[in-house]
Image (cartoon, grey):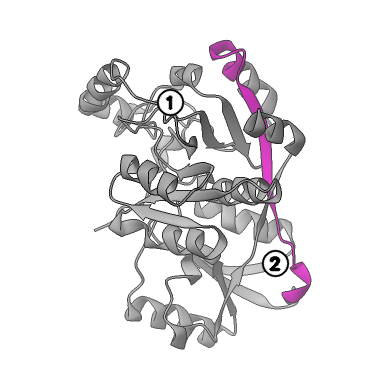
Amino acid sequence: MKLKKPSFWDLPKPNFLSYLLIPFSLPIILRNFLFQFLKKKKSLNIKTICVGNIYLGGTGKTPLTIKISEILNKLDIQVATIKKNYSNQKDEQLLLKQKTSLIIVDSRKEAINQGVNEKYEVLLFDDGLQETKIDYDIKLVCFKSKNWIGNGQLLPAGPMREKISSLKKFDAVFLNGKSANFEKIEDQIKKINLDIKIFKTFYKIPNIQKYNLESKYLIFSGIGNPSDFKDILLENKFDVVREMVFPDHFEYSLNDLEKIQNTARNEGLKIITTEKDFMKIPEKFKKEINFLTIDLVIQDEKKLIELLTK
């Protein structure tokens, strides 16, 4: 059974329940302590970039991976994206396969050999900042600006895989979405790593005209931060009447999809979901379900190109 992210993770400070769970963070603390002593190796035969997170789930790393792949392709650099073969992440694999040259592997180290054999110049890893064997040439870490680091605690007391102090070992931070606290977040980042590059990103709907904004909508999603999906719809004047939220990477049963469909029919609503969720839906349901196409926009993209090509 998949669980939804606990709401107390994203409180500004730890609450009582969070403090109760801190002793259960000991395995993460021990792993992170030992992690710093591991001897990881950079490949001499191919360049590697990792797009990952230290906040668990829903930080926008897959859209950023796709965007970087597009940038490198425009620069005539032969790039493959790498995804480790997790059975519960088929949705991300399908999305990457559609939009990039994807290699799916059981171990990321195996991807290095495959990439060299297939004569790629760059391997772009979607996830893997906690990898124990590879020292990437460029390490990029993603956050949602709205949530930032939540209560700042390690799993399961909070949403963090590593403490925020680990920013000292990364090359760039990507802050996705709007936030009134940008300056405060940037100051916090720079106190940890003065040399780290900071990029702001946001989503736009490239083909807004294809959607009927006079209609009323039922929306559903099984992603890390479903509020982001709803927010972009509301910002673009969609009339969202009903929302159905499922756990991240949720595998929809026929019963789930029939319930969504019947609810929309009974209430006279059109259905819209995320592109990632749409990938998992059987063909027979797709006639009544639309998906939202989004593009990732990176402010100061030229600065990112300089980082990638240096």
Q: Pick out the residue farthest to the right.
A: 209
The residue depicted at 47 percent of the width and 83 percent of the height is 261
Q: Amino acid at mark 2?
A: Phe
Q: How many C-alpha atoms fall within 10 Å of the one at disc 2: few (<14), some, or many (≥20)?
A: some
Residue at which label 2 appears: 238
Q: Is residue 65 above or below residue 52?
A: below
Q: Position of residue 278 (x, y in %)?
A: 50, 71
Instruction: Identify the secondary structure beneath mark 2.
Output: loop
Residue at which label 1 appears: 152
Indicate whether residue 201 is drawn in magenta: yes
Q: Quadrant of the C terminus?
A: top right
Q: Quadrant of residue 88?
A: bottom left
Q: Quadrant of residue 89?
A: bottom left
Considering depth in this image, is 232 or 68 the residue closer to the camera?
68
Q: Quadrant of the N terminus?
A: bottom left
The residue depicted at 46 percent of the width and 33 percent of the height is 11
Q: Is residue 89 visible?
A: yes
Considering depth in this image, is 115 or 48 the residue closer to the camera?
115
Instruction: Identify the secondary structure beneath mark 1.
Output: loop
